[in-house]
Image: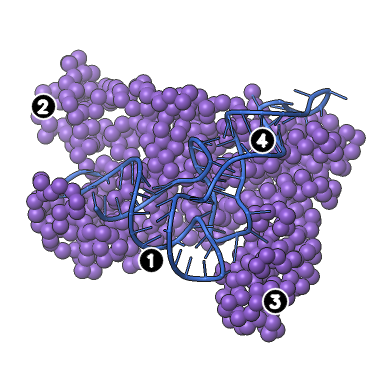
Chain colours: A purple, B blue
Amino acid sequence: MNLFTDIRELVVAELTAMAAEGQIPQGLDFANVAVEPPRDEAHGDMATNAAMVLAKPAAMPPRAIAEALAARLARDPRILGADVAGPGFLNLRLSNLVWQGVVAAALREGANFGRSAIGRGARVNVEFVSANPTGPMHVGHVRGAVVGDALANLLAFAGWNVTREYYINDGGAQVDVLARSAYERYREACGLEPEIREGLYPGDYLIPVGEALKVKYGSALIDQPEAVWLTDIREFASQMMMQMIREDLAQLGVRMDVYSSEKALYGTGKIEAAIQTLRDMGLIYEGVLEPPKGKAPEDWEPRVQTLFRSTAHGDDVDRPVKKSDGSWTYFAPDIAYHHDKVKRGFDLLIDILGADHGGYVKRMKAAVSALSQGSVPLDIKLIQLVKLYKNGEPFKMSKRAGTFVTLRDVVEQAGADVTRFMMLTRKNDVALDFDFAKVLEQSKDNPVFYVQYANARINSVLRKAREAGLDVSDAALARADLTQLSHAAEIDMAQQIAEFPREVEIAAKGNEPHRIAFYLYELASEFHGLWNRGNEDASLRFLQDGNPATSSAKIALARATGVVISAGLAILGVTPVEEMR
RNA sequence: GGCCCCGUAGCUCAGGGGAUAGAGCGGCCGCCUCCUAAGCGGCAGGUCGAUGGUUCGAAUCCAUCCGGGGUCACCA
């Protein structure tokens, strides 16, 4: 249930009736009519801008519309009062029964509370991580992995049909480097001195690869020329790397539905087919690009290349799909890959990329726009850097990988839940500071702790109530006399709970999972506030000695809050804690 | 120089075209005989980078400019 859309439907229904009865003109567009919580509590529980939005097209003063609408809305049992205010806002006060009903709904719906159908089952592909299979995942990948996974959870919760996909970049030169590096480790496993030359991957995570190669090939590849072993070792090593990456992702609680290989596109005609599709649209031509503007064109020389006319779909310059030697650029398989996604029938594509791929956004959008003839939107989320700190000091670590902090280092130090939550405490396009000390701190400036603490307190109440002999099952609590929840502080709590479904929809529409993390912080804050009100006003404590009926109602409110915390954390992929230690 | 992102309280950051712009930290003042004070309440602190524009209404949309970061033809 989403109370705000319910009330908006009521408003639109009344406006429609007003049009039918001639109170306002026929045929007005109600699309911009909004029902939202007002910023200021004094303005009531909900506000609608209907009168202001419609005043001009209806050629009527806003107050006249607002007053007529108010009179009609006031007849609905849910609405206690409708007051015209300010320039034409209509402020609605809702019956406590409405808010009490939200508590009951949360208890009834449980983990499904807040679930939405706005996605209408549309098929969306979320591509994320897509790290090269040349080593373990490092910090740079963590945020993208978490954002992608949480976004996928969010969209699924909001009614989209989600596919999580990893694009294995195994077609380029970097996997050759991997093969050569692994070969040296193989020589090492065979008792020879490895030559980890400049440009090879030095990390000791390749030692097991070398040992595995020795098991498979014995000494057969020693002193053989590269041409003999390169292809086999490349395949072998990248498979082992992918296995490691899958394990890394599992550590973070991330799972993929589909792994697609770049290499698998070569030799299948898929790249050629994608380019041919563009060629048939007149978007492929042989030409010479202008030198990059403003950059010293010293080493620039005109070259004839095969170009994609991406400017026809919003890009700034056309982009090469073939190098001057006739081989594909990296862009060509990427076009083919997105072509494949379009052909698989997705209604929406989302790519989660590192912020250093900013220059890549327009051309990829252009390609998808062309290949789908504008029918499949591509949203590209660029993920900004994570800066690591420990107690405020920049943090460097090189444990097992040689030069970088790995995903495993982060998860081992901070834990998957903390890592995931923290990665979602910023918008994707803002850099994020991650302090290993602060994220584990048990204080309110640590949002993970703060939210988890609220959940622990709720569990504490339930535990105490159970010890006192109360039935605190959700079914029993849903039957409690919730009309006893009438104090303003309790109604405020219920109102915050009612925000959850609305926040889910806003977050899903904008592909912004971080909104859920911020919402949970606010929800927790409301709960901690209510909890402490019990210190001053004993009637606000959840457990009321000798009054099981009242206790049940208040516990129902606490439990409903817990239900929402769990549902929200589930979207983030974080496990709620039962008890702080 | 082109393109992209950012610019909101001393600091770190929220804020779907709505009313008097919010939170945490830091500062000051309060709250535990009582479900976890690991918390809560209050006060102080703002020309929302600047200037124009669109709009009944702009932190939000558009344009230009100023700062900071990223990126920039045969690397993926």
Q: Disc 4, disc 3: CB below 8 Å?
A: no
2 and 3 marks in contact (CB < 8 Å): no
Q: Quarter holding the C terminus of chain A?
A: top right
Q: Distance between the Cα atoms at labels 2 and 3?
A: 89 Å
Q: Position of residue A224 (x, y in %)?
A: 11, 27
Q: Using the rendered image, report if marks 2 and 3 lie on a common chain.
A: yes
- Mark 2 or 3: the one toward you: 3
Q: Position of residue A553 (x, y in %)?
A: 81, 44
Label 3: state its secondary structure: helix
Q: Nearer the viewer, mark 2 or mark 1?
A: 1
Asked if badge 2 and badge 1 are on a common chain, one would say yes
Q: Which residue is mark 3?
A: A64
Residue matched to label 4: A455
Q: Which residue is mark 2?
A: A224
Q: Position of residue A368 (x, y in %)?
A: 32, 60
Quick check: do tags 1 and 4 share a chain?
Answer: yes
Closer-to-camera residue (A221/A204): A204
Question: Around disc 4, counting alpha carbons within 10 Å, would you say few (fewer than 14), some (14 to 19), or many (20 or more)?
Answer: many
Question: Could you confirm whether marks 2 and 4 are on the same chain?
Answer: yes
Q: Nearer the viewer, residue A76 or A28?
A: A28
Identify the residue at image location x=71%, y=51%. Answer: A495
Secondary element type, mark 1: loop
Q: What amino acid type is highlighted by mark number 4? A: Asn
- Residues beneath discs 1 and 3 located on the same chain: yes
Circle 2 chain: A
Question: Looking at the figure, which quarter contains the N terminus of chain A?
Answer: bottom right
Left or right of A286 in this view: A498: right
- Please, what is the three-letter code of the amino acid marked with disc 2? Gln
Residue that numbered label 1 is attached to: A375
